[in-house]
């Protein structure tokens, strides 16, 4: 079984646990991974990579993500989400749609963001969240440049702001909630979060985790996105059976003269499915980045 299973992750479960649940149904020897970690309290789209699809991670993990959620004002927690301990309280600010629009514009584009202390970033080889849970004194992470392509803020109540966010990889919605609170001269944390999209994958395509596990336990006939389709608009080159055999054995010379101009990365396909992902090196030559087994679609 090779492909991408789109799961609508429920709250209260880590992304790693979703992978374990799927792997348990497929068998211990199955290769299973995921794209873009969702915090346990968050819900929504979690692409699960199965079999040869695990090789696609480097080409898909940099894709933009889309979210909806809400920011709770007046309270900041150590985790910057509803699961944490309250560390600061502040007076609820006065704000209207005009002020929210100005703040949204301020946090749109390439911005600097300080990641949360409770994050998977490592210090001395240890994830920061592990150090934080041990009660260790930790210097805040250094600011990082992230890209926010679209941010919409909408007043829900005196203490709640709904938002819609389209952002590049590495952007923390929890840090954004904190920073919006600071811009309003108050405190804040992320009240809830739901991922709507990851690259070209949409939540509307996803299946509830329990439903997916039930199918895997019965006939296993669960809907997967094929590898060729998963790479979306990446340029592609079609090869015949002879070139396919050579490429699957690592002979990149089979692509001589078939390299798409200015393509950078491109996919190599045959009648049997995805053969490889290659990179343009010159007008006539390429290098093989990943090779896939013949069963991959």
Image (spheres, rainbow, N blue to C red):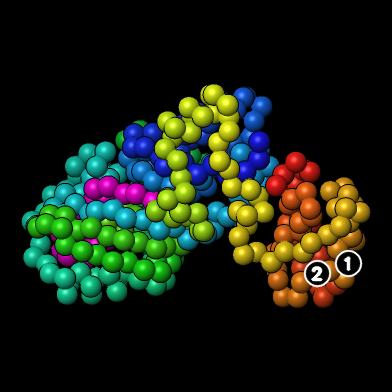
Q: Relative to 6, is 231 above or below? A: below
Question: Which image quarter holds the N terminus?
Answer: top right
Res 83 quadrant in image: top left
Mark 1, residue position = 256
Q: Is residue 186 magenta?
A: yes
Res 104 quadrant in image: bottom left
Is 62 on the left-hand or right-hand side of 71? right
236 or 41, nearer to the observer: 236
Please report the residue visible at 60 percent of the width from the left and 60 percent of the height from the top. 232
Tell me the crowding category of disc 2: few under 14, some 14 to 19, or many 20 or more residues within 10 angstroms, Cα based. Answer: many
Element on which disc 1 rests: loop
Please report the residue visible at 51 percent of the width from the left and 58 percent of the height from the top. 199
Is 51 on the left-hand or right-hand side of 139? right
Mark 2–mark 1 CB contact (< 8 Å)? yes
Is 297 on the left-hand or right-hand side of 107? right
- Asked whether residue 290 appears in the rendered view, the answer is no
Q: Position of residue 275 (x, y in %)?
A: 77, 52
Mark 2, residue position = 259
Q: Position of residue 29 (x, y in %)?
A: 66, 27
Which residues fall within the magenta stretch?
A: 179-195
Res 10 quadrant in image: top left
Q: Relative to 211, is 283 above or below? A: below
Q: Position of residue 253 (x, y in %)?
A: 90, 61
- Asked whether residue 68 appears in the rendered view, the answer is yes
275 or 60, nearer to the observer: 275
Number of numbered markers: 2
Q: Is residue 168 magenta?
A: no
Q: Position of residue 66 (x, y in %)?
A: 40, 58
Tell me the crowding category of disc 1: few under 14, some 14 to 19, or many 20 or more residues within 10 angstroms, Cα based. Answer: few
Tag of residue 118: none
Please report the residue visible at 73 percent of the width from the left and 52 percent of the height from the top. 274
Element on which disc 2 rests: loop
């Amino acid at each position: 079984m090779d492909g991408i299973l789109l799961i609508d992750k429920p709250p209260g479960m880590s992304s790693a646990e979703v992978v374990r649940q799927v792997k348990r149904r497929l068998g211990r020897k199955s290769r299973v991974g995921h794209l873009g970690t969702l915090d346990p309290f968050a819900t929504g789209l979690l692409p699960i990579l199965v079999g040869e699809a695990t090789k696609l991670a480097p080409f898909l993990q940099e894709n933009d993500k889309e979210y909806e959620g809400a920011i709770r004002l007046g309270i900041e927690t150590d985790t910057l989400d509803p699961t944490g301990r309250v560390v600061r309280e502040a007076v609820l600010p006065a704000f209207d749609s005009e002020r929210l629009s100005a703040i949204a514009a301020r946090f749109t584009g390439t911005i600097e963001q300080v990641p949360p202390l409770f994050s998977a970033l490592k210090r001395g080889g240890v994830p920061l969240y592990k150090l934080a849970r041990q009660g260790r004194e930790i210097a805040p992470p250094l600011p990082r440049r992230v890209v926010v392509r679209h941010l919409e803020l909408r007043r829900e109540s005196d203490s709640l702001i709904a938002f819609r966010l389209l952002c590049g990889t590495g952007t923390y919605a929890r840090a954004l909630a904190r920073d919006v609170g600071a811009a309003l001269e108050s405190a804040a944390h992320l009240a809830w979060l739901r991922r709507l999209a990851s690259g070209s994958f949409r939540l509307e395509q996803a299946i509830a985790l329990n439903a997916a596990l039930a199918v895997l336990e019965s006939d296993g006939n669960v809907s997967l996105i094929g590898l060729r389709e998963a790479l979306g608009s990446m340029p592609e080159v079609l090869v015949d059976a002879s070139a396919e055999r050579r490429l699957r054995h690592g002979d990149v010379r089979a692509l001589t003269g078939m390299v798409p101009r200015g393509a950078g990365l491109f996919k190599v396909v045959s009648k049997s499915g995805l053969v490889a992902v290659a990179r343009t090196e010159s007008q006539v030559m390429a290098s093989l980045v990943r090779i896939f087994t013949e069963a991959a679609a």
